[in-house]
Image (cartoon, rainbow, N blue to C red):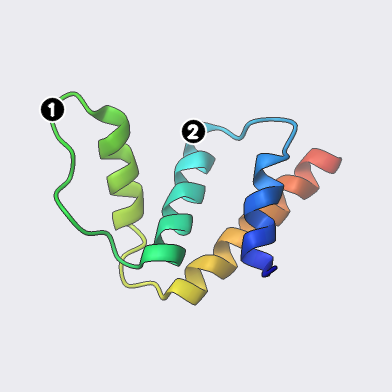
Amino acid sequence: MTTFEQAQQDVQALNKKPGNDVLLKLYALYKQGTEGDVSGKRPGGFDFVGGAKYDAWNEQKGKSQDEAQLEYVALVEQLRAAEAQ
């Protein structure tokens, strides 16, 4: 199991759900780390969640998949450390 895969499991095991900003960052780094740059059209209308996810992922554009995975792992480690205090 890679550290990225382990981080995916670790984030699910957190006792306290992170705030929406952190969740969007995790989502964006995960998507960038697994699929690369965002594709397709931005959801519109009243799909506020879809639009926010698209925007967060789009902010990661140009970042390599390896770099995104490393940032994801680091963020999960920060969350786990904060929870352990």
- Count residues near mark 1 (Cα–Cα under 10 Å), then give few for <14, some for 14-19, many for 20+: few
Image quadrant where one finds the C terminus: top right
Q: Residue at position x 55%, y 32% from top? A: 19
Numbered label attached to residue 45:
1
- Residue drawn at 51 percent across, 40 percent down: 23
x, y (%) of residue 60?
36, 62
- Which numbered tag is attached to residue 17? none
Above or below, 14 against 5 in this view is above
Residue 37 drawn at (x, y percent): 30, 66
* Quarter that holds the N terminus: bottom right
CA distance separating discs 1 and 2: 20 Å
Q: Front-most of 81 and 5? A: 5
Camera-nearest label, 1 or 2: 1
In depth, the one of 31 and 74 nearer the eye is 31
Q: Amino acid at mark 2?
A: Asn
Element class at badge 1: loop
Residue lying furthest right: 85
- The residue lying at 44 percent from left, 64 percent from top is 34
Where is residue 25? Give x, y as percent: 47, 49
Q: Which mark is residue 20?
A: 2
Which badge, 1 or 2, comes first in the chain's sequence?
Answer: 2
